[in-house]
Image (tube, rainbow, N blue to C red):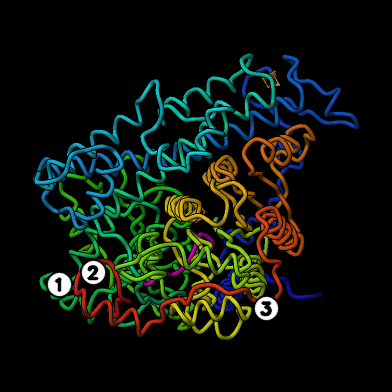
Amino acid sequence: MDKVIRSASTSAEEILEWAEERKLETCFDRAAKLKPCPIGETGACCRVCHMGPCRLIGKNAEKEAMGVCGATLPTVAARNLARMIAAGTAAHSDHSRDMANTLLAVATGETKDFQIKDAKKLYKVAGILGVEFEGRPVNDVAKDVAEIFLQDFGRQNGELNYCKRAPKKTQERWKKYGVTPRGIDREVVEMMHRTAVGVDHEADHILTQGLRTALADGWGGCMISTDISDILFGTPRPIKAEASFGIFKEDEVNLVVHGHEPTLAEAIVAVASKPEMVEYAKSKGAKGINIGGMCCTANEVLMRHGIPTAGGFTNQELAIMTGLIDALSVDVQCIMPAITEVSKKFHTKIITTSPKAKMYGAVHIEHNEHNPNKTAEEIIRLACDNFPNRKAEGSHITQKYPLIGGFSDEYIEYMLGGRWRASYRPLNDAIMAGRIRGVVGLAGCDNPRVPATGIHKFLVNELIKNDILIVSTGCGSAACASAGYLTPEMALENAGPGLREVCEAVGIPPILHLGACVDNSRILTIATNMAKEGGLSDEIGGMPAVGIAPEWMSEKAIAIGCYFAASGVPVIFGGESPVGASKEVTKIMTEVWMERFKGALHFEPVPEKMLELALKYIDAARDALKLRKYEPGKFGTDRVLMDMAARREIKAAAHTGVGGINES
Ligand code: SF4
Ligand code: MSK
């Protein structure tokens, strides 16, 4: 019998084999045992009331099947998708609300442990929100900004502040089709209401509110969260780090931060370097304290401090199996409850920290936004105390890969044009000339139902070979990083000739790591900047750009896919469609949305077909924009890109401001 490959990462596969010999169960084993229910998998099951659950199946289910109340398959499938959007939006946005509350606490002095680290970003945001900032104390500006953001959550009418950041034409489409979001909480609540038993029954009508809710996520929850994280902790710029299981150190206390929120993790990173903490670790027999990350909390601290990442979602149980993690501090989202079970076999302490999330078998040390350093210190001491309890067993993997992360939209603008002429012009020119065929946003989770990270790897290889620039976030970035794909050298080896030339001139990898899931908002900003720069489409729709989430699993991914579709980006998700049972709903997502918004949401389980569809969309957009036909190795004339030497000269003259690879 052929060996079943569960992960495309050789280190992960090694740990899985080690675990199998010891009969240790993981999500991969459970995924193999627990096949998805075929009715629920395609969106044909309704359980919104207790006359059901109703299964809308049969030969002619689309037209004939009905639930007890009379709901048809398109209604049920649309409701299921809409509720996923609402849940995903709620997750990002509740995280974002906490960020706004933290900003307010810092501004009013209730939190002394954090300060405004990036005043320049604060002023940029203040400018967008219409907050006066010239000559005012930084904290006063921050207070006004935080209060305006908080209003966006509870706003009842009007529109979200950040809608105005989108290109005018994109905003007009939203208005025309009634999807401009009002308040973040309002859209989520209305979505839940409309999908309750006996309310909204027209699939298109339900999904229109679905898009409105998703836009509240993208241009609200996610974008607000990204901006506040930058204001408080600094706007990322390129930084070196490492990825995979080899980041753990045998002779140091290994403390891993996992989840999504940057606040407590920032405090942990700061407090762990204090001499008294290092001394404490030494008193327990360790040489120091090594902070590592997991999932999107990892991305947050990697982007700003170069903290190494142990990888994405499917790596969490495997990381514990190295036997080297002394404490795993989790906040919210994408944390498998199974990790406490695995940890029992090792010495790892699992610590829950959010007032919103507890787990059986975990220690709870609650994060208090007014005093994060105190909580951080308690967690670090607990990790140090646990260091002497390490057992000899464990799959001690040493493989790790270097990476460069930290590509904010601000840095990309600088990188392309230089400090004095920062602009997206060179990117637009390179696309127009055919050097870069198009742009793909590669996002979303890794998934144990496919060889985990395998579709990511296949797609990035093929896309960059086809001169497609990739911007990545979330576990997609972690998948690329732990495969060694986030280094400039990758461009030389695998990228097509045009993309390679651009990457070499600018000194960037062909895959730009933009951060956590919420930082998909940076991709919206990049697309907006490209539209405003001119020469391509004058709205986000119609750009030679596609979004792909090949191994998605979370409801948050659905919300993200839908906000990209409503913003004008064709999106391709891997796996079976969660609404595949309904032809009407599938048509709405792929054809109706394309007509209205120039965006779409496809589900395609075959990786080769995903690639084909992405290239088809990109080439069709190039044709519609009357751009030079893409031919590998043949380019039109475009402007000379600034090379690294030219940029260093500028940097030497400038001294300050955003720019320069951070060598730390
Ligand atoms: Fe069944 Fe209708 Fe209740 Fe859904 S709302 S569970 S279709 S009776
Ligand atoms: S962590 S949502 S598994 S990307 Fe943001 Fe990763 Fe998906 Fe969670």
Work out whether residue 405 can be spotted. yes
Q: Is residue 637 above or below residue 359?
A: below
Reply above or below: 287 against 181: below
Q: Which residue range is magenta in the image?
A: 308-314
Q: Nearer the viewer, residue 466 or 220?
A: 466
Q: Residue 268: where, in percent of width, then height? A: 24, 61
Gap between marks 1 and 3, in whole Å?
61 Å
Res 310 quadrant in image: bottom left
The answer to whether mark 2 and mark 1 are in CB contact below 8 A is: yes
The three-letter amino acid code for the residue at tag 2 is Cys
Label annotation for residue 384? 2
| Mark found first going from the N terminus, 2 or 1 | 1
Q: Is residue 233 left or right of residue 64?
A: left
Residue 503 shown in magenta: no
Res. 634 mark: 3
Give above or below for 361 relative to 619: above
The residue drawn where x is 50% and y is 54% is 534
Kindly report the distance in space between the C-alpha atoms of the residues bearing marks 2 and 1: 7 Å
Asked if disc 1 and disc 3 are in contact, CB closer than 8 Å, the reply is no
Task: Residue at 42%, 68% (x, y): give it.
Answer: 346
In the picture, measured across the screen, residue 125 lies left or right of residue 246, that is left
The tag earlier along the polypeptide, 1 or 3, is 1
- Position of residue 32 measured from the top left corner of the image (x, y, whole percent): 69, 58
Which of the two marks, 3 or 2, is nearer to us in this view?
3
Q: Quadrant of the N terminus?
A: bottom right
| Left or right, residue 585 beside residue 597 | right
- Say what amino acid the circle numbered 3 marks: Lys
Q: Nearer the viewer, residue 412 or 200?
A: 412
- Residue that badge 1 annotates: 280
Q: Secondary structure at mark 3?
A: loop
